[in-house]
Structure formats: structure tokens, C-alpha cells
């Protein structure tokens, strides 16, 4: 008897548009911002 083929449907991810938001990632260089992330985490620098 032949094996049954399983068909896997591919989920297409839709790009969400954020009007009036220029940043495409959630990292800010501004120290006072809530999304502030240091460039180099660690001692010194």
C-alpha cells in the first residue's frame, strides 16, 4: 500500500504598516527613551 502524502500549507507573513512611525526596529539611541539600547553591553566602552 502506498504512503499518504501530507500537504503542508505555508503561512505567508504580512508586513504590518505602522503609519507615522519611521523606525522599523524598536531600538533608540536617545538615552532618555524607553527603547534605549547601549551599542556595546559590557564593561567600559
Image: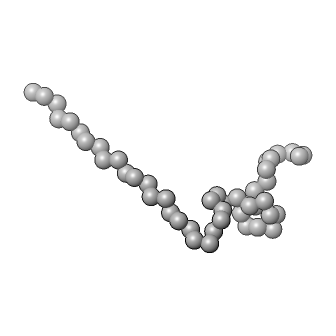
Is residue 30 shown left or right of residue 8? Answer: right
| The quadrant where residue 36 appears | bottom right
Q: Which x, y percent locates residue 38? A: 79, 53
Camera-nearest residue between 22 and 30 = 22
Quarter of the figure that contains the N terminus: top left
- Figure disc tally: 0
Is residue 31 shown left or right of residue 15? Answer: right
Q: Which x, y percent locates residue 24? A: 62, 59
- In this picture, is 27 found above or below 6? below
Camera-nearest residue between 25 and 6 = 25
Residue farthest to the left?
1
Looking at the image, what colour scheme do you see? secondary structure
Residue farthest to the bottom?
20
Residue farthest to the right?
44
Give the residue drawn at x 73%, y 67%: 34
Camera-nearest residue between 22 and 28 = 22
Give the residue drawn at x 71%, y 63%: 35
Give the residue drawn at x 50%, y 63%: 16
Give the residue drawn at x 40%, y 52%: 12
| The quadrant where residue 23 appears | bottom right
Q: Which x, y percent locates residue 15? A: 49, 59
Amino acid at each position: 500500500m502506498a504512503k499518504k502524502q501530507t500537504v503542508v500549507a505555508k503561512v505567508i507573513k504580512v508586513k504590518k504598516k505602522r503609519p507615522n512611525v519611521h523606525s522599523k526596529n524598536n531600538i533608540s539611541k536617545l538615552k532618555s527613551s524607553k527603547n534605549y539600547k547601549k551599542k556595546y553591553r559590557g564593561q567600559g566602552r
